[in-house]
C-alpha cells in the first residue's frame, strides 16, 4: 500500500475559506470553532456580511503578527510528521487491512481557529498552527487523514458516502459513526504509542456510540466486523 504524501500550506485566504465552510453550523459547534475572543459574533446579531468582514480582518491580522511563529510551527510540524508518518501509515494499513489510499494530493492548511474541518472530495483539511502543544497539532493531522481513508473505505465496501441518511437514524448518523470510529482508534494503545494524546467524545450521542463501538473493536479488532454492525444491521 503506497502512503500518501501530505503537503502543509500557510495561507490566510484558505483559512478564510475555512470559516466560510464552517459557518453553516450554528450555536455550540460554531463557538467551538471560533477562538473565545470571537464568541461575541455568535451572541450578537450581525449580518453575514459584517461577520465575514470581522473574521477576514481577524485572520489577516493574526497571520501577519504571528508570521514568524507560524512559519516556525509549520516547519516543526513538517519535520515531526515526517518522523512518525511511516509508523502511522503502517498502523492505519493494519486497521484497514491494507486497503489502498485514494490517489491525489492531500493538503493541510494552517489555521488560527479551534476546530478543523476537511473536504473529503478535495482531500483538503485544516490543522492548528498557534497551539503550543506540537503533539496535539500532529494528532489533529492524523485524525483528519484517518477520515479520508475511512470515507473511501465505506464508499467502496458499503456504498455509503458522508451525506447518506439512514431510515430512522439521526441525519448526522454517518458523520457520528466516522467521528466515533476515529475516537476508538485514537484511544487504542498501538495508536497512543505514536500520539501521546487521548481523545474524548464530542457530546452525549458520541459517548453512547463510543461505548458500543469500543466493545466491538475490543472483541475482534476487525474493521469489517465493526462497520458491518453500523452499515449492514
Image (spheres, grey):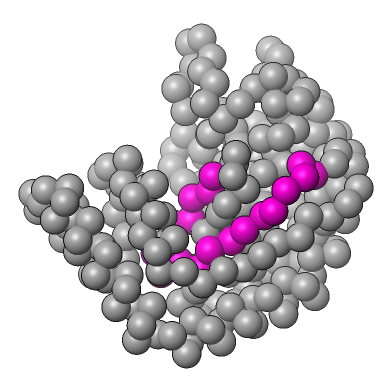
The quarter holding residue 225 reads top right
Question: Does residue 197 sit above or below 157 in this rendering?
Answer: below
Q: Residue furthest left?
A: 45
Q: Residue furthest top?
A: 167
**38 or 50, which is in the foreground?**
50
Residue that appears at 54% across and 44% down = 119
Residue that appears at 13% across and 56% down = 50
Residue 157 horizontal/vertical position (percent): 77, 23
Would residue 193 be visible to someone looking at this image? no
Q: Which residues are magenta?
A: 101-119
The quarter holding residue 108 reads bottom right
Question: Does residue 70 sit above or below 93 in this rendering?
Answer: below
Residue that appears at 59% across and 44% down = 122
Residue 193 horizontal/vertical position (percent): 78, 66
Left or right of 165 in this view: 31 = left
Q: How many marks?
A: 0
Would residue 100 be visible to someone looking at this image? yes
Left or right of 67 in this view: 91 = right
**24 or 230, which is in the foreground?**
24
Left or right of 133 in this view: 232 = right
**232 or 7, which is in the foreground?**
7
**Magenta stretch: includes residue 104:** yes
**120 or 45, which is in the foreground?**
120
Residue that appears at 47% across and 34% down = 205
Amino acid at each position: 500500500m503506497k502512503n500518501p504524501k501530505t503537503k502543509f500550506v500557510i495561507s490566510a485566504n484558505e483559512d478564510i475559506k475555512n470559516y466560510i465552510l464552517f459557518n453553516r453550523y450554528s450555536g455550540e459547534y460554531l463557538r467551538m470553532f471560533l477562538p473565545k475572543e470571537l464568541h461575541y459574533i455568535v451572541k450578537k446579531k450581525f449580518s453575514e456580511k459584517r461577520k465575514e468582514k470581522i473574521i477576514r480582518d481577524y485572520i489577516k491580522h493574526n497571520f501577519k503578527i504571528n508570521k514568524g511563529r507560524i512559519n516556525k510551527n509549520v516547519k516543526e510540524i513538517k519535520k515531526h510528521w515526517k518522523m512518525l508518518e511511516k509508523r502511522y501509515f503502517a498502523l492505519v494499513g493494519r486497521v484497514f487491512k491494507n486497503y489502498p489510499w485514494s490517489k491525489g494530493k492531500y493538503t493541510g492548511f494552517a489555521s488560527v481557529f479551534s476546530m478543523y474541518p476537511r473536504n473529503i472530495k478535495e482531500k483538503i483539511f485544516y490543522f492548528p498552527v498557534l497551539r503550543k502543544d506540537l503533539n496535539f497539532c500532529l494528532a489533529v493531522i492524523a485524525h483528519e487523514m484517518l477520515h479520508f481513508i475511512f470515507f473511501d473505505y465505506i464508499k467502496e465496501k458499503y456504498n455509503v458516502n458522508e451525506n447518506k441518511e439512514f431510515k430512522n437514524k439521526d441525519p448526522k448518523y454517518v458523520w457520528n459513526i466516522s467521528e466515533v470510529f476515529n475516537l476508538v482508534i485514537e484511544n487504542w494503545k498501538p495508536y497512543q504509542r505514536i500520539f501521546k494524546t487521548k481523545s474524548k467524545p464530542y457530546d452525549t450521542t458520541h459517548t453512547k456510540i463510543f461505548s458500543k463501538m469500543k466493545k466491538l473493536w475490543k472483541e475482534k479488532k476487525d474493521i469489517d466486523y465493526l462497520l458491518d454492525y453500523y452499515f449492514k444491521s
